Image (cartoon, helix red, strand yellow):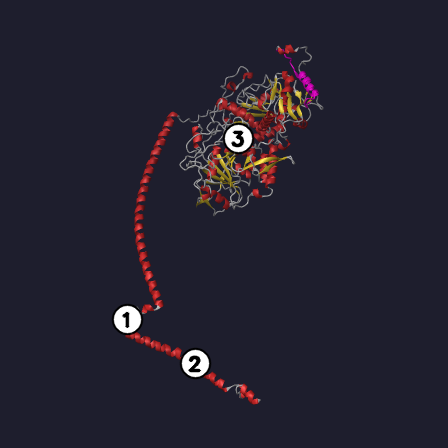
Amino acid sequence: MSGYTMLRNGGLGNGGQPWMLRWSSRIRLSWLSFTLLIILVFFPLIAHYYLTTIDEDNQGKPIFVLRKDHELCEVKHVQDLCRIRESVSEELLQLEAKRQELNSEIAKLNLKIEACKKSIENAKQDLLQLKNVISQTEHSYKELMAQNQPKLSLPIRLLPDKDDVNVPLPKSKRNCRLHNCFDYSRCPLTSGFPVFVYNSDQYPFGNLIDPLIKQALEASVRTNVYVTENANIACIYVVLLGEMQEPFMPKPTELEQQLHSLPYWRTDGHNHLIINLSRKSETQNCLFNVSTGRAMIAQSTFYDSQYRPGFDIVVSPLVHAMSEPNFLEIPAQVPVKRKYLFSFQGEKIESLRSSLQEVRSFEEEIEGNAPADYDDRIITTLKAVQDSKLDFVMVEFTCKNQPKASLPTEWALCGGREDRVELLKQSTFALIITPGDSQLVISAGSAMRLFEALEVGAIPVILGEQIQLPYHDMIRWNEAVLIIPKPRITEMHFLLRSISDNDLLAMRRQGRFLWETYFSTSDTLFNTILATVRTRIQIPAAPIREEPAVEIPHRSGKAAGTDPNMADNGDLDLGPVETEPPYASPKYLRNFTLTATDIYRNWNNAPGPFHLFPHTPFDPVLPSEAKFLGSGTGFRPIGGGAGGSGKEFQAALGGNVPREQFTVVMLTYEREEVLMNSLERLNGLPYLNKVVVVWNSPKLPSEDLLWPDIGVPIVVVRTEKNSLNNRFLPWDEIETEAVLSIDDDAHLRHDEIMFGFRVWREARDRIVGFPGRYHAWDIPHQSWLYNSNYSCELSMVLTGAAFFHKYYAYLYSYVMPQAIRDMVDEYINCEDIAMNFLVSHITRKPPIKVTSRWTFRCPGCPQALSHDDSHFHERHKCINFFVKVYGYMPLLYTQFRVDSVLFKTRLPHDKTKCFKFI
């Protein structure tokens, strides 16, 4: 067993290790070490020796040579190297050939450059010669024009001496008219109508004037553009009077002495205007039996022996002395028919002989022997109408409380002003019975009734044609008032019932306009009085104040790229483009060429307050329903002209604007990147005169912001506060009649803008734009809604992309009720709706939409205010508030849209395409 174990363990001896295995391992390690030593030491030495020997034997000869049998190239990797060498050699040869060819081309191009330089020099010489020829031609043209139309220089103003009394005296003060009682030498056409107002506190009668009237007039004087402190150059000298405290009222002789002692009275008071205003119906005629000489009188009460037609002025009482009228309390103009057909409240304290006491027959009255007083017949007829119950009428001839004091034969007012106004709000017509005394031309009581009726929309019906209404020689009263002779009292009921609803609404709207423009506040009253005098002596209005633009300095020079989307005209083919440098629109040139026809048209037919206020640089004369006549063209029929650029319409039809450009007004607020992109899109836009950027943020633009160079000036205007009303300020930097109001994120093609501008040139009194909206009546809530859904009709065009006349910017900023602008600031919304209300109210026409575009937002731009959830709710509120301010809904629906006459019409390229206003 032990022998077997020993054999199995390999003959293990001591320690269990086979001696043969240990010996073989040692021999293998020794042999391996010896072999490595030979390879690492002896082989390099042998190789070195061999190479040294070859180097000595073949000194100066290459180691590898090309043999005839190409023995060396037979090696594979050497063959690859040879092929690479051959390929590189061929490429070098080709490059050398190309280099020589390019050198020859460069030489030829250098020759062409030299030739072009010579051509440019020749062209410059030709251009210089052409400029000289053009300059000489223009000079010759100016000489010819000067020969045919000599330049008219302004006359030298004559300033008479302080004591100049060369005006001939009339035989009687009753015969005073402008030609014999007014000194025209103090009021040249170029004088600007300076007005000097006496300080009432410096004279005894000033301390007796009603404090409210005094404060109101003094506030109006401080803001009036015609008032001057230099009495030596004044055209008119205004003396302010008013209701005087009854116990302290001076006697006529005392008041006369105080007036004659005025420093610039000049013995007869010529060129003086005495304004005697009243707040109450019972105001007495304090100037009766006072010798006022050649001074004009403006007051609410006149006797026939006192009133001088064409010289004195009948004015309205000053009811709202120190407060603005509350438009929310004024009733709406619709519905047309109210609860009562007509109403009258009054009591007659003293009258002339009663016609019922005289036994007179109807035949005698027809023969001309009319009774002295028709009041009794009027009472009987009106009571009969009330008892017939054919219509609801309210007539009361006895006051419940003590009636107001009044002049003899005048109907006294009953109750307080609030009670009378509440009754008039329920009356379609308001009766005004003139005083029975035919010598009383106008009384404060009748003027007060007229004021209250116009204020609340009750159409005045005046019984008695002898009355002289306020500013009767300047206002066409028959558009707002019914004047019926007293003998026709029995026919009055029939006449009132026969008037249509359309006529009633037109008269009510005109009456509301007259009240707002001429009677509502102390400012309008004072402006109206001065405008009446200024118009009578034919002096044009002073220029209206433009908004001074405080420009923000900015760096420009960034080259604006050309957006291919802007150059794509789509389906519009607009013909040739007027490519001319920027030029301003011609100013209003009819300032000193007013005629009697112009004055009559302006005052009597204008539906808006255009002639009480100073004229604008682009002042259009607006006849009935506001058709533009004085500034370019109004409505033009389709005109001819090859190319259809819009210019031919004006030139062929006698328009005075043969060429024209527009100004872009862009409102922005801290969106510099969006603004820069929008400005770059205007690069190369035809007809563009200037870009006015209204910077609405208190934070100035970044100093490192580089503005694009678009070929026209970019004016950045800084505003006083963040207000959307700043969009419509009449900035003095706007030198064109046409204004394109555009948002900073609006995305319009050039052809669309051009088309809209050409359409506006043919409808200058309208808003012409792209996105349309409309208003709708919410039956469940009985209110108006703003709607932006797609519809077959519209009533508004958003001013985020629309053309309008700069004249509307003056009206929006200076004439439109302040309550509307305040609401725009409150909601930071609705300025576009307010502008649409204003234009539709003035023109009674809807806006014009061009192209099929319904939105204009650029893709990828940051969200604007219109994306807010409350945006539409606020616009609903705005519309309803604006309706309350205007008293009715001025917006008008239209299904009319303007496109190019060849819109989506495919024609061969050799056919002439044109544009026409359809």
In percent of width and height, residue 612 lies at 54, 28
Dot 3 and dot 2 residues touching (CB under 8 Å):
no
Q: Name the residue under label 1.
A: 61
In percent of width and height, residue 787 lies at 58, 38
Q: Mark 2 points at which residue?
A: 33
Residue at point 68%, 27% (across, down): 419
Between disc 3 and disc 1, whose residue precedes? 1
Q: How far apart are marks 3 and 2 (CA)?
A: 121 Å
Residue 198 visible? The answer is no
Residue type, mark 2 in image: Ser
Residue at point 44%, 27% (across, down): 154
Helix, strand or loop at disc 2? helix
* 452 relative position to 896: left or right: right
Q: Name the residue under label 3.
A: 225
Q: Report the span colored magenta.
A: 368-394
Query: Residue 334 versus residue 568: which sits nearer the camera?
Result: 568
Label 3 CA crowd tier, 10 Å (few <14, some 14–19, many 20+): some
Residue type, mark 1 in image: Lys
Question: Looking at the rendering, which quadrant does residue 40 occupy?
Answer: bottom left
